[in-house]
Amino acid sequence: MSGWIAVAGLGPGAEALVTPEVSAALAAATDVVGYIPYVARVAPRAGLTLHPSDNRVELDRAALALRLAAEGRRVVIVSSGDPGVFAMASALFEALEAAPEHAGTEIRILPGITAMLAAAARAGAPLGHDFCAINLSDNLKPFAVIERRLRAAIAGDFAMAFYNPRSKARPEGFARVLGILRAGCEPGRLITFARAVSTPDEALSTVTLAEARPEMADMRTVVLVGNAATRRVGRWVYTPRGGKP
Amino acid sequence: MSGWIAVAGLGPGAEALVTPEVSAALAAATDVVGYIPYVARVAPRAGLTLHPSDNRVELDRAALALRLAAEGRRVVIVSSGDPGVFAMASALFEALEAAPEHAGTEIRILPGITAMLAAAARAGAPLGHDFCAINLSDNLKPFAVIERRLRAAIAGDFAMAFYNPRSKARPEGFARVLGILRAGCEPGRLITFARAVSTPDEALSTVTLAEARPEMADMRTVVLVGNAATRRVGRWVYTPRGGKP
């Protein structure tokens, strides 16, 4: 039997948010490759080898998957959320580009519920109109790129979703992001901090830009910033479909 | 038994992309409300009343759901894709704001696989770095807003996903969008036209901006525009994680 790779999105955490397509791929796999906490979400079973690896070794992990598939193994690379949003799909294609001997590998990308959409659903519909997704991690890009994109998103009056807003390694980055938002948006702009949505650690809070503090975010948080028309109705936050009414 | 509303995302089309959470809500429902082709995706059964309605009556549909829930019915409002992305969740909150007598309604938003992420998965990982989602329909917003957001997205070097790129009612809008892209991006910029992903009518093609033509899109198409670093590897299109290498 010939090998293959499926890059699968496990969604934000709850089993009820894993698509049947992803469950079927995991049931057919011989090997699961991924970041330690994501591999830990896959139930062990006879005939399935788990290959957990550490953060920041995405290219090594992708190269391992390509080697295993070449040996005839059926490999699922697991990502949290959706594999195409700040996750393993791009890393696999980078690895494939660097290893032309694996050009014929059978690859499928299996979408999942990405964190910003799970968070938006809990909050209401803050991304209900045009929006941007920005990764605030500066591991792989300079902060100047982040700043350029933030300013463009403000200029376009996009709602925004921020992934990886804050880590111990770079506690000051998110404070700079809030400063850029304050320079370009009104103080009443609504911001939702959504942590670990759909897991037992879930916590959600919505504040105004004036009230927002860097320590409201950590690496398990997705931050949703409304556009100029975003508002509350009861406990919900939503962005109207037609812009400012 | 008290009534409730769940606004559920059915994903792009395939049953294997419907989350178990959404399937459970449909199994518990007494009423399903939605646009005709989405309601047609729900299997009829005893005890379930289907309320299909036409396009562009989103607020009437949401008001019906609120009335039914007030009568104790368990109502699922079905959306294609994700209900929070250019779909029914915002319309429901608009209707709730206009009907304070329904403020106590139990509401849940159930996320789904949105069209751009299903399309991106088929193409590779074109949204693998910071990106924007823009609804090109000018039913509810003037074209000037669309143009402002396109220019901002180009200035920020975002990858982009366009929903509702073209309809019979406004065939010229997407030609103007391509013109704005040509003025701000290099002619080799990669554009993927993804039609009816995960359905029997699925069709995918990737061309350069120089080759792109308005008639490559219709209302069942999602258009994905890469950023300046987006490139091909074999049959795949992907955006590297760290910007231009």
Image (cartoon, coloured by chain):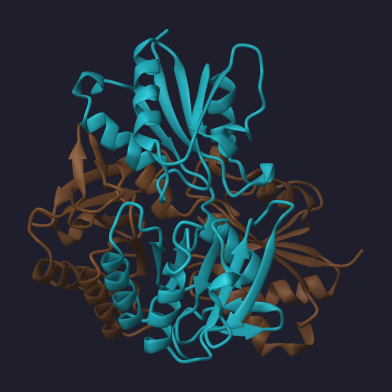
Chain colours: A cyan, B brown
Residue B122 visible in the snapshot: no
Q: Is residue A49 above or below residue B146?
A: above
What is the count of numbered marks? 0
User: Residue A48 appears at what percent x and percent y?
Assistant: 58, 16
User: Residue B42 appears at what percent x and percent y?
Assistant: 63, 49
Residue ranking furthest to the top: A1
Q: For this rendering, which residue is in front, B9 or A43?
A: A43
Quarter where residue B32 is shown: bottom right
Which residue is depicted at the point 56% across and 69% down?
B88
Which residue is depicted at the point 63% across and 84% down?
A232
User: Residue A41 appears at what percent x and percent y?
Assistant: 63, 35
Which residue is depicted at the point 50% across and 55% down?
B81
Q: Is residue A38 above or below residue A99?
A: below
Residue A34 visible in the snapshot: yes
User: Residue A39 appears at what percent x and percent y?
Assistant: 57, 32
Q: For this rendering, which residue is in front, A137 or B211?
A: A137
